[in-house]
Amino acid sequence: MSENKTHSEDRTGPRLSGPLSALGGPGLPITVGTVAFHAWTDMVSEAARFVLERQQQNARARNAILACKSLDDMWQVQADFFTVAREQYAAEPGRMLDLMNKAAASGMRVSKRARRYDDVPL
């Protein structure tokens, strides 16, 4: 029976060497990289969404201030603007933390497949 496999490959793919060999398998670094990439893109998307929302809010407030006929109306628009801005800025760290927690949970699911410190062949 002849095998066409090289010494560095088995049924699961190429073996890792060096410091990556402790990560526990050929697919794990790619999986961890994928999880990190998705976490990064989720966070960048959320940041872009937040900035866009704030810019739209700024434009609405500017237009409302320009349409004011009295100083009292302008103060009310400005107070409403700052109230909404404060609420949005206060909520955004929570959204980012939720994204980080989701990414960490995804990473924990991946790491359960990793080799443990006491599972290193001697």
Image (tube, helix red, strand yellow):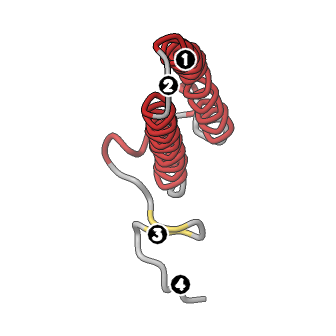
- Looking at marks 2 and 3 on the same chain, the residue that comes earlier in the sequence is marked by 3
- Looking at marks 4 and 1 on the same chain, the residue that comes earlier in the sequence is marked by 4
Would you call the spot at circle 1 few (<14 residues within 10 Å), some (14-19), or many (20 or more)? Answer: some
Q: In which quarter of the image is residue 80?
A: top right
Q: Which residue has dot 4 on it?
A: 3
Q: Quadrant of residue 93?
A: top right
Secondary structure of the residue carrying tag 2 is: loop
* Residue 25 in sight: no
Secondary structure of the residue carrying tag 1 is: helix
* Real-space CA distance between mark 2 and mark 1, rounded to the nearest whole angstrom: 7 Å
Residue at the image point whose x is 60% and y is 20% from the top: 91
Q: Which residue has dot 1 on it?
A: 73
- Looking at marks 1 and 3 on the same chain, the residue that comes earlier in the sequence is marked by 3
**Residue 9: which disc?**
3
Residue at the image point whose x is 59% and y is 30% from the top: 104
* Real-space CA distance between mark 4 and mark 1, rounded to the nearest whole angstrom: 83 Å
> Measured from the top left, where is residue 87 in percent x and y?
60, 16
Horizontally, is 83 left or right of 58 in the view?
right
Q: What amino acid is at disc 3?
A: Glu
Secondary structure of the residue carrying tag 3 is: strand
* Real-space CA distance between mark 4 and mark 2, rounded to the nearest whole angstrom: 86 Å
Q: Which residue has dot 2 on it?
A: 69
> Closer to the observer: label 4 or label 2?
2
Q: Are marks 2 and 1 in contact (CB under 8 Å)?
A: yes
The answer to whether residue 90 is above or below residue 28 is: above
> Measured from the top left, where is residue 58 in percent x and y?
44, 33
Q: What amino acid is at disc 1?
A: Asp
